[in-house]
Amino acid sequence: MLRELVTALLMIVMVVFTSPTGEMADNPVVKINQPSLSQGQTLIVKIENAASRPEGTFLDQSLKFSKYQNGWLVFFGISYWTEPGEYPINIKFVNGTEISQTINITKGNFKESYLTVTEEQQKIVQPTEADQEIIQRKEADNELIAQAYSQSEPVPLWSEPFIRPVEGHVTTGYGFTRYVNGKVNNRHSGLDIANAAGTPIYAVNNGIVRLAENLLVTGNTTIIDHGGGVFSSYAHQSELLVQAGDVVQKGQLIGKMGSTGFSTGSHLHWVMRIGSAYLNPDYFVGRDLIHDAEIVIP
Ligand SMILES: [Zn+2]
């Protein structure tokens, strides 16, 4: 009886010492969403069974893993500026294990978009040296925007798929090369959805409002931080119905469609962004991203 008790106690001690912190053994499993992605899509890396935060690099940037449930998670946005090709993702664990995988990036299907505007409007996006007031206002706006995108909750604030923020028809797609009065202006950073002025705009997922301001180019603009480095932005609104710091739920009314700022008619310019990359908003609709990373890499 005593011997059995001692044996049982020894076994408990052994189990405790094999796993001193009570956490899972470090035998990491790495999962990604897709080994081949096109410009504007998102690489998702999920790691299970790793007690300590791993380190990783992709496209010369370090991967900022967030703690998520029993593992780690990172979302990496692939910009329309990233050259198509094969790029390695490297992940290093505290126990010395290293995992590498090649990610293939393909060209996005981007077209051209031509806008004709008045000279007054053209100055807003293509100011000359004489337009000092516009230049200074844009600098101040850019500072506000940069600040809004600089703080993201470390953990994703959502658990359900993203939704479309508004009803309407798409007038200009994501990533299009935009010409203003015949001159190349930039890439179109989001999706333009047109409908009547006043059409309600809803938060695409749970988050925290980081900016709700009238800006020169994007008019009445809202930026929402969804956590994990994922942001959404809503431009040209007629009315802002939330304030910076507000916690919003998926589907919550946040504003109304309008034509404020650099705009030729009532529409929503909807942006999804991770890090410094503007992403294809359509890619998010119907996905929660978290459960999309199911391919185990060796
Ligand atoms: Zn737009």
Image: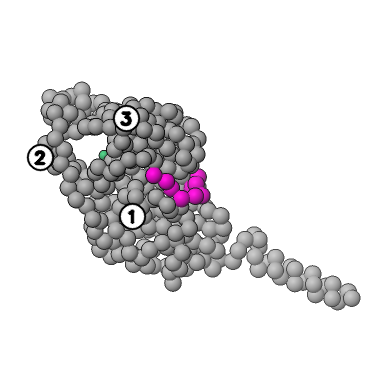
Q: Residue 290 magenta-drawn?
A: no
- Which residue was labeled with disc 3? 197
* Residue found farthest to the top: 133
Q: Residue 23: image x %, image y %?
A: 62, 61
Question: Quick check: 103 above or below 189?
Answer: below
Q: Residue 211: image x %, image y %?
A: 39, 32
In the rendered image, which quarter contains the N terminus?
bottom right
- The local crowd at label 3, few if under 14, some if 14 to 19, many if 20 or more residues have their Cα within 10 Å, is some
Which of marks 2 and 1 precedes in the sequence? Answer: 1
Which residue is at a point 36% across and 65% down the rendered structure image?
35
Q: Residue 26: image x %, image y %?
A: 55, 66
Q: Which amino acid does label 3 sit on?
A: Ala
Query: Between tags 3 and 1, which lies in front?
Result: 3
| Real-space CA distance between mark 1 and mark 2, rounded to the nearest whole angstrom | 29 Å
Part of the protein shown in magenta: 156-164
- Which residue was labeled with disc 2? 182
Asked which secondary structure carries label 3, the reply is loop
Residue toward you, 213 or 198: 198
Question: Quick check: 275 above or below 243?
Answer: below
Q: Quadrant of residue 182?
A: top left
- Which residue was labeled with disc 1? 41
Which of marks 1 and 3 precedes in the sequence? Answer: 1
